[in-house]
Image: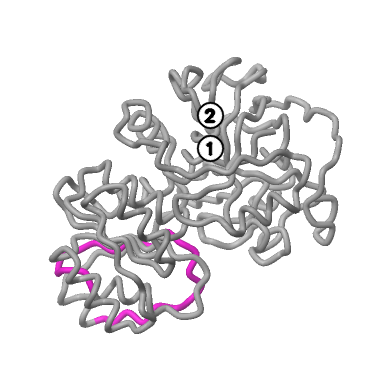
Amino acid sequence: MTTPQSGLHLAELPDPPLRGGGATLDVLAAHIPAYTDVLVAGGRGGFPTPIVLGACGIGRVTATADDVFGVRPDDVVVANGLFRSGRLAHPEEALLAWTGIGGAGRATPTTERIREVWRDGLYAERAVQPERTLVALPGADAYPAPERLAFLPWLSIAAEAIDRASVRAGHVVAVVGATGQLGAAAVLVALARGAAAVVAVGRDRDSLAALAGLDARVLPVPLSGDRATDGSAIAAAAGPVDAVVDTLGAVPSPGPTMAGYDALRPDGSWVLVGGVRQDLPIPYGDFMHRRLTLRGSWICRDATILDVWSMVRGGVIDLSALDITVVGLDDPTAALTAASQSRGLGIVVLVP
């Protein structure tokens, strides 16, 4: 994008130069999330321009700066886009070549500077990324389908939320928003973590059916739009719900999220990891007497990425479940259109 109003377009640019603290990558594959057209149109906040978008993907390291030791040339790496300032007492975080501010959730001079400095994203043949956003994947050079690895960042975001919900083998996990791509990732991770049942909650019945086809432990619950009805259905699907992971995106009402809250058993965990832009009417006394735990989750730790890769490499998570549409760089408009129509286990991947 040349300006905020220019839209996403193909351009021939010089290779991004290597800089201190960074590594250059040959981009192998990058996921295009379903909401990318909304982001490009300015519906998810701003970013500096000109910019090459693309926060997350898979690449092969071609060179590293003299002060980089965590990744090496020829490593296959995940780029997760999350740049942390390193000030632990006052964390400031930003997603590179994308929108999204962590820490206090508000832009600061530091987060603005981070995004100004690092804006060569992964929707390109080559990119330069800071070392602190890269995780080397041992053995990934032998993985037969690198386009499927483009989903690793979203699986890792989902895994962070599952872990924050303290999910253990034998738990019943409800994923609210399971028909979205992050929700589908959460279903895959919950199954891999040994959930006794995964209650998949969402609106799109075709996506729910595809999730149910993964494993007999996946129990679909279509949303009706009525909070009381939906909460009762989630609670009844597999018995007491130990954890609810809310992965919903922008929705017009807090009702579906609160239906997940209603379904939780006493002492259950409720983790918010989606993009809901609603205030939640949480009743103090009810929350207290049920002894619930509420946690937020945003992006993921590097250790989580490596853990998810180990599950993929070992066959615990089978990426053949994904229905992948591969697009190239030649037609950005067609790529955004395809991505906007994707959902659930269906993802659009850019392979330059």
Label 1 crowd bin: few (<14), some (14–19), many (20+), radius 10 Å = many
Secondary element at image label 2: helix
Residue in the picture at 43% in, 47% down:
157
Residue 210 position in % (x across, y down): 38, 54
Q: Position of residue 184 (x, y in %)?
A: 40, 53
Q: In the image shown, does 215 or 283 lie closer to the viewer?
A: 215
Q: Measure how far apart labels 1 and 2 are at the Cα level.
A: 7 Å
Q: Quadrant of the C terminus?
A: top right
Rendered residue at 49%/41% (across/down)? 151
Quickly name the residue at label 1. Answer: 150
Q: Quadrant of residue 286?
A: bottom left
User: Which of the 4 image quadrants contains residue 100?
Assistant: bottom right
Name above or below for residue 73 compared with residue 190: above
Q: Does dot 1 land on a helix, a strand or a loop?
A: loop
**Residue 58 locus on image (x, y percent):** 57, 32
Q: Residue at x 58, y 62 (%)?
A: 106
Within the magenta stretch, is there residue 108? no
Residue topped by disc 2: 146
Determine whether, in the image, residue 164 is placed left or right of residue 50: left
User: For the residue marked with disc 1, what is the amino acid?
Assistant: Ala
